[in-house]
Amino acid sequence: MIEARPDFVQQTLFGDDVKRSVNQISVEDHKLLIRMGNGLKRARVTEEGIYATSDWSWYNQRMCLTDKNFWKIFSMLTLSVTYCFFIKMGNKIFGSIYHDNDAFLTVTSMEAYFFAASARMLAPILMQKIGFFKTYGLVLILQTFLAFTFVYVAYEKHLFRAYVILSLVCEGSHFSIFPPLSGAIYGPV
């Protein structure tokens, strides 16, 4: 427990939490609150830890471009969806190299878009249960496997369909787990 800076806690927390929090805050929580700095909107101390709300609406574009977290999120998202965009936009063209049946390719795309939309609803639920990094890690491992093995199985109709569907599930998952992460870091505005 930290007792070196109770004045910081009293300045940061609001209401009745101030009196109870001085002895409950840990060193890690104290460092987190300091790191949030001006973006800290409100914090509530419970027995499980600190619930902090941030508000980065005062951030301008220049500040955002110099922020380390912005570049981490940007690189994670850019590197994660490159393969997914290729499959999303070119699965019929890529599939036509191996399959002559246009109806098969159209139905495959239709099914893949349906599962991508479903993944956009289910991935945040999974993220809430197991956390962002585990969810992102699962999606990234699946996507990496798909990206490096797709050309070896593309000639088989059923595997081609499964790979396209799973690739777009990864794409849907990526685009539904990053906005909450950004909102948690920079606030809802």
Image: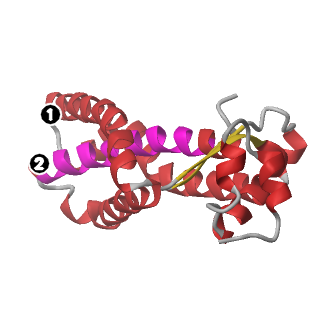
Q: Is residue 121 left or right of residue 50?
A: left
The residue shown at (79%, 59%) is 34
Residue interval drawn in magenta: 159-182
- Residue located at (45% from left, 45% from top): 174
Residue 185, position as x, y percentages in the image: 66, 46
- x, y percentage for residue 77? 56, 51
Q: Is residue 18 above or below residue 56?
A: below
Quick check: 148 above or below 91?
below
Instruction: Specify the quadrant that holds the N terminus.
Output: bottom right
Q: Is residue 35 magenta?
A: no
Q: Say left or right for 72 vs 131.
A: right
**SS for dot 2:** helix
Spatial CA distance of label 1 from label 2 is 9 Å
The residue closer to the viewer here, 142 or 184, is: 184
Foreground pick, 5 / 109: 5
Task: Return the residue nearer the eye: 148 or 117.
Answer: 117
- On-image quarter of the C terminus: top right
Q: What amino acid is at disc 2?
A: Lys
